[in-house]
Image (tube, coloured by chain):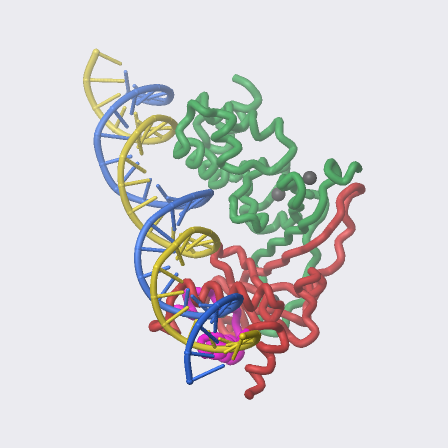
Chain colours: A red, B green, C yellow, D blue
Amino acid sequence: MTEIEKKLENNGIRPTAMRILIYKFMAQKEVAIALTDIEDAFVKAERTTLYRTLKTFEDKGIVHHIDDGTGISKYALCEQGCNCELDQDLHLHFHCSNCDKTVCLTDHKIPHINLPDGYIAEDANLVITGICEKCSGH
Amino acid sequence: MTEIEKKLENNGIRPTAMRILIYKFMAQKEVAIALTDIEDAFVKAERTTLYRTLKTFEDKGIVHHIDDGTGISKYALCEQGCNCELDQDLHLHFHCSNCDKTVCLTDHKIPHINLPDGYIAEDANLVITGICEKCSGH
DNA sequence: CATTAAATGCACTTCCGTTGCATTCTTTAT
DNA sequence: ATAAAGAATGCAACGGAAGTGCATTTAATG
Ligand SMILES: [Mn+2]
Ligand SMILES: [Mn+2]
Ligand SMILES: [Zn+2]
Ligand SMILES: [Zn+2]
């Protein structure tokens, strides 16, 4: 049993062939993944299966959903120790307006905000748009 | 000529009856407005007209677009001195998970974030989700 | 009044996410 | 090993919301 299979089973996910492939695919990418990205990479697979795989990964807590403001849902593997299910891993996300890629900046947590009286914060989403390191010529 | 008509003309918007009504509607609301909200309020009007009115308002800089993460675009009148066209009025937005309303917190600017080397910020969107003052019992 | 431009109304499209249900595969119990 | 149960997959269709094309109406101008 491989590392990935263990990882999946440990999180209550049956390690089917498709799921292992998708996990590998996401692990090798350093950017957030859209459903269409996986579709393009696995042309033989059904859109729905891929969709539900992402959903399962998310439900089981090994992937987090990213809303980068493009209107297209992105997903990324959770880092070790990520508590995103508890809305406690509030790192920010960066979306490049040039290459259209979105990345997790896991080291950059969303700063605490003092809200007006009566407002209770439960979750936060911060997306910075601009030019990524690759597009800016680093 | 009313205040509103002046406001519209000053921003290069022909003050038609519909536009004046929509402007009034938005001005009297203290929350961000979705297209469907206006649709419901003006059942006799065409969706497209309302849609394009919002777009015109936005293009001319008297309204700013809000992406609160619900997947439904919201709009709010710009405050005096709002430079949102220049991405320089980066106040945050609050979305209530109870009443589903979104408000501008115009006094709460998005804090400056130090990005990793090579990243260039151009815009930012910060949405806090939680319970609003009305729903929390203030 | 005639001419021109802008705003509106209606129909239709696109995009993405989502669901229902039949089928296939995998696990578990007999 | 076989049968039964449960989960995953494949296929088809739906849904909401944003957006577009074009004909028609309304307003502005001379
Ligand atoms: Mn992330
Ligand atoms: Mn606002
Ligand atoms: Zn880039
Ligand atoms: Zn509320």
Q: Residue at x 55, y 88 (%)?
A: A1
Using residue B100 as the reference point, say whether residue B34 is left or right of it: left
Relative to B22, does residue B101 appear above or below in the rendering? below
Q: Quadrant of the C terminus of chain B?
A: top right
Residue B57 in view: yes
The residue most toward the bottom is A1
* Residue nearest the viewer, comparing A137 with C16: C16
Residue A15 on the magenta segment: yes
* Residue nearest the viewer, comparing B103 with A81: A81
Q: Residue at x 67, y 42 (%)?
A: B98
* Residue nearest the viewer, comparing C18 with B34: C18
Which secondary structure dominates the residues rendered in magenta? helix
Q: What stretch is highlighted in magenta?
A: A14-39
Residue A19 on the magenta segment: yes
Q: Position of residue B116 (x, y in %)?
A: 63, 72
Give ligand 2's quarter of the image.
top right
